[in-house]
Image: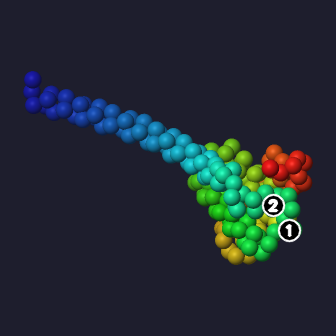
Amino acid sequence: MTLEEIYYIGQTVAVVAILGSLVFVAIQTRQNGRTLRAQAAWDARASFAEINDMLAAGGPISEVSYKAFTAAETLSPYERYMMHRLIRGLLQRAEAQYALYADGILDPEVWRLRRGYVRSLFSNALFNEIWKVEKANSMFTAAFIAEIESAEAQEGPIFLGVDSIGSVYGPPE
């Protein structure tokens, strides 16, 4: 075997190795993208689940939240403040999810559901008032505000014990 033949064999092996490493990098990149999207979807769901867990645990925030859905006009100034902070947190979580969606990381269906849910909250007068205040506070990006406000208006969420317009339909426990 001549040096020239060894050189060509070496070149061929190098090309195959480079192609193999490029295929490996492409597979890893694809898997990492899937993992990133799965983690974003998990975080999006877990973020809202944390709020639900907190409200389900009972206590002052849970009581004030129930009152906000059933008799918002009876909330004290401090209770209104508590609801404002709770809704601000929910909106901030939604904006974080919007950023993931806008960057192509969060699944469009997950974002569509979150967007619709947030928009449905504005059927409650107190939540609508909080949204207006938050926009005036410059808490959210113009893109997020436009995204939420362009969602189709819909009835508010329904929880057992409270209908979509906030009326109590069963005795509170």
Label 2 Cα crowd, 10 Å radius (few <14 / some 14-19 / many 20+): some
Report the amino acid beneath label 1: Thr
At x 37% / y 36%, what residue is drawn? 24
How far separated are the C-alphas under marks 2 and 1?
8 Å
Say which of 170 and 43 sits in front: 170
Picture quarter containing residue 139?
bottom right
Label at residue 149: none
> Furthest residue to the front?
173
At x 86% / y 62%, what residue is drawn? 71
Is residue 57 positioned above or below 129 on the image?
above
Report the amino acid beneath label 2: Lys
Say which of 166 and 8 sits in front: 166
Earlier along the polypeptide chain: callout 2 or callout 1?
2
Residue matched to label 2: 67
The location of residue 156, given as percent across then percent down, is 83, 53
Say which of 127 and 162 sits in front: 162
36 left or right, relative to 45: left
Q: Is residue 10 visible?
A: yes
162 left or right, relative to 17: right
Q: Is residue 101 visible?
A: no
Quick check: marks 2 and 1 in contact, CB under 8 Å? yes
Label at residue 74: 1
At x 69% / y 58%, what residue is drawn? 59
Look at the numbered disc 1 and give the secondary structure of its residue.
helix
The location of residue 115, given as percent across then percent down, is 73, 53
